Each structure stands twice: as structure tokens, then as C-alpha cells.
Image (cartoon, rainbow, N blue to C red):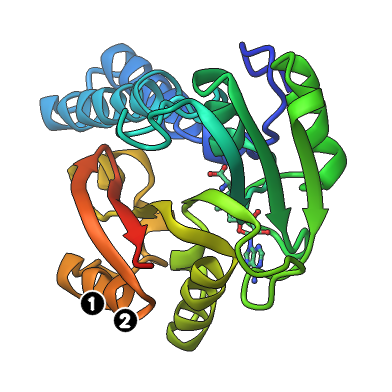
Amino acid sequence: MPTFSKYEFGYSWFVAYGHLVPLALAAALAAVAAWRRWPRWVSVLAAVVIVWAAAGLFLMNVAFGINRPMALPTERFLASGAGRVLDAGAGSGRAAMGVLLSRPKATVTGLDIYEGYWGIDDNTPERFMTNARIAGAADRAEARTGDMRDMPFEDGTFDAVVSAYAIDHLRPDGIVEALAEVSRVLAPRGELLLMIVNVDWVAWLVSPHAIAHHPRQDPARWRARLEQAGFVVEEEGRKPATLYFLARKRQ
Ligand SMILES: C[S@@+](CC[C@H](N)C(=O)[O-])C[C@H]1O[C@@H](n2cnc3c(N)ncnc32)[C@H](O)[C@@H]1O
């Protein structure tokens, strides 16, 4: 399926373009309603669905950029542009590519369990490395298979960790374990940029069916979890369908 992007993040057709289905059905309904002179409310309903689906398509592909490297939500993350970065739950590498492109002296290790279905077709370390090659940064990237609740790295291996829409997919005890592991593999004063799905109006427009699987997030609960894992939250904010936290490991 063409993605109109040189990258191959592999998000399934229905994730990126699923809005085309209701859009086409509503357009067909509008055409039949006009032809058969059906009551006006039918055309109005079809128009509402068309506007919703077009907005969802735009937000997912243009504003959110599901098939583009991620624009990191804060410039303060790894402001030096250099260091050893871990992407926890890296998948096909949207966040990792965002780091490699915007932090030109950083190296990135993508860690992912690479099993199960997470909206990405053929989610493999090879796909992650294909994207690193497309980004022109394969020499600064590596993909590892492993569980972020029990990471295959020595203590203090990384200067920074990024994690996007992955830790929040774990069960509550898994979240605690993963944050403890992030803290363990970070060097003292290392940084964590954590992004989680936020059920806001953009999320509802973009993906109401997927959002049904995501609980409403309580920022205070995430702050408490981060503090419990040994972090100080330095910045917190919202982006479309996203809550993010920039946190620093205490000594
Ligand atoms: C929704 S995807 C997000 C992928 C990527 N971070 C992105 O933003 O495109 C969630 C990812 O978390 C990974 N994942 C889930 N549980 C994991 C675990 N216990 N350890 C490592 N990765 C895990 C999945 O394999 C999947 O690639």
C-alpha cells in the first residue's frame, strides 16, 4: 500500500487510511440521496460523516503524521544533540527516527518485543533498520529484540530514553516494571521522554474504535509513577492525542 512517505513504518491500512471507508460510503449515500430525492436529513447525515472522515484522514496523516518520523514534543530532550539513546517499545521506529534526524550526534538503540499485533504490519527489527537506512542514519542505529520490563542492558547504559505509545500499553504492574527498568539502564541524571496516548478530541476524531481500548489518562498518576521510579518531572504537556513527560533521573 503506498504511504506517500519514503519511510516504511508499516502502520496498517485501516490505521492510516481507514477513514476512506466511511468517507466513500457516505459519498455514495449522498449521491443516491440526491438522485432519488430522499429526505434532506439523509444528505445532511452523509455530509457530517464526510466532514468527520476527511478531518480524521487529515489529522492522522498530516497533523499527526503516522507515516513520518515523529516530531519530538519538546526541544529540551537531549538538548546537546549527542548521547546514547534507548527507544523503549520502538516498533518500526517513528520516535527513534525522530531522534536520529533531530539529534545528529545521538545513537539510538530500538528495543521492542517484536511479537503480537500493535497496529504495525510486519513489525520487525529489520523494518526498524530499513527506516534507519532511509533516514541516512543506519550507522547510528541498532534494533534489539527484548522485553522492556526486563531489559537486556547493563545498568547506566544510556544517557536518554524515549518511549512513545508503548509503556502505556502495558498492564499496571508492567508499567511499574518498565519504568524501573528505564531508570536502571539510564545513567545518573539521564533523561526520559515519555509519550502516552491521551484520549482528547483529536483522538476521538482520528480513531474512536482504537480509543475504546485506551483508558482515560490521569497525568497525576503518571507523575506519581515517574517519581516512584526515581525521576523528577521537568516538563509536561499535551500534543494531539498525546500526553508527554520529560523527566530526569535523580542521582
Ligand atoms: C503502538 S506501538 C508504538 C511503536 C512506536 N513506539 C511508535 O510510536 O510508532 C507499541 C509497541 O510497543 C511494543 N511492546 C509492547 N509490549 C512490549 C514489551 N513488553 N517490551 C517491549 N516492547 C513492547 C510493541 O511490540 C509495539 O511495537
Find residue 77 and report its horizontal and vertical position in percent.
Answer: 37, 37
Residue linked to disc 2: 228
> Which quadrant would residue 228 be assigned to in this image?
bottom left
Q: Nearer the viewer, mark 1 or mark 2?
A: 2
Farthest residue toward the right? 126
Ligand 1 located in image quadrant: bottom right
The CA distance from mark 1 to mark 2 is: 6 Å
Work out whether residue 17 can be spotted: no
Residue lying at 20% horizontally and 48% vertically, measured from the top left? 235
Q: What kind of element bears circle 1?
A: helix
Work out whether residue 250 can be spotted: yes
Quadrant where the C terminus lies?
bottom left
Find residue 60 and report its horizontal and vertical position in percent.
Answer: 41, 30
Q: What kind of element bears circle 2?
A: helix
The image shows residue 16, relative to residue 238, as above or below, that is above
Residue linked to disc 1: 224
Find residue 185 and report its horizontal and vertical position in percent.
Answer: 60, 65
